[in-house]
Image (spheres, rainbow, N blue to C red):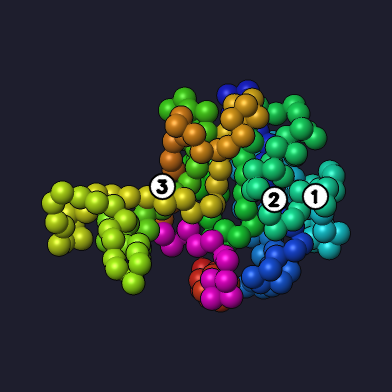
Amino acid sequence: MIDNKKVLAIIPARGGSKGIPRKNIKQLAGKPLIAWTIEEAKKSRYIDRLILSSEDPEIIEIARAYGCEAPFVRPKELSEDTTPGIAPVLHAINQLPDFDYVVLLQPTSPLRLIDDIDGCIENMWNVGAPACVSVTKPDKSPYWMYTLQENNMMKKLIERSESITRRQELPDVYALNGAVYVAEVDWLLASGSFLEQETVAFEMAKSRSYDIDTEEDFFLCDLLLSKRF
């Protein structure tokens, strides 16, 4: 709870991962991937209820073993490859309507810390914004990126009148890292997205911003977590 406002945290974890089969419960540095998110979220000063949204019985069983509630089984139609990421969140809010704020914590960000979760909540509250999302500085600036046209002709992704030759001259840019999303429940139900003009950002270090999508990501996070402890 923050300033007498109730906070619901949702961990979405479907069973049909294609890139890495059974990714959400695959062993990562000695425990299932999803356990890293559950254990960190349980340390929060603000989260009143932490739940899992999944259609998969094995994921539900493992999440419960690590102390995460699973008050419902997610409908199959909200667990497809084409299901928008916001859909399970809106479904969970409608199942559990008595909350003021909602926090989305994807299990594919195992390096995030409680300081990132609570920091994102505090940032939204302190600036009076309806939503806050975590971001990080990308390795490569989009000002040095190109699209390929016909015959592989290069075209700058972002056109600028002046030429930039030094990295230090580039404007600071930030990318979503997928680790933490926070929003007012009523605002999110009305907007249907965490990302609107009113949304503010919470910057996270690159070292905690890995989002597991490939086997290489999994290997790297396993190595980093193994060295952390």
Q: In the picture shown, does residue 194 fall above or below 171?
A: above
Q: For the residue labelled by badge 2, is the local secondary structure a helix, a strand or a loop?
A: loop
Q: In the picture shown, does residue 177 fall above or below 91?
A: below
Sequence-wise, the earlier of marks 1 and 3 is: 1
- Residue 163 forms part of the magenta stretch: no
Q: Quadrant of the C terminus?
A: bottom right
- The amino acid on which the numbered mark 3 sits, given as a three-letter code, is Glu
Where is mark 1, residue-wise?
A: 77
Where is mark 3, residue-wise?
A: 203
Where is mark 2, residue-wise?
A: 83
The spot of residue 213 in percent (x, y) is: 58, 66
Magenta part of the protein: which range? 206-217
Q: Nearer the viewer, residue 42 or 217?
A: 217
Identified at 70% across, 65% down, the residue is: 17
- The amino acid on which the numbered mark 2 sits, given as a three-letter code, is Thr
Q: For the residue labelled by badge 3, is the local secondary structure a helix, a strand or a loop?
A: strand
Identified at 44% across, 43% down, the residue is: 202
CB-based contact (under 8 Å), mark 3 and mark 2: no
Q: Quadrant of the N terminus?
A: top right
Would residue 92 appear left or right of 207 to someone viewing this image? right
Q: Measure how far apart labels 3 and 2 are at the Cα level.
A: 28 Å
Is residue 226 in sight in this rendering?
no
Q: In the picture shown, does residue 161 fall above or below 188?
A: below
Q: Nearer the viewer, residue 225 or 173?
A: 173
Q: Nearer the viewer, residue 134 or 120?
A: 134
- The amino acid on which the numbered mark 1 sits, given as a three-letter code, is Glu
Identified at 64% across, 43% down, the residue is: 86
- Residue 215 forms part of the magenta stretch: yes
Q: Measure how far apart labels 2 and 1 are at the Cα level.
A: 8 Å
Would residue 162 appear left or right of 19 to someone viewing this image? left
Q: Residues within 10 Å of mark 2 (few under 14, many from 20)?
A: few
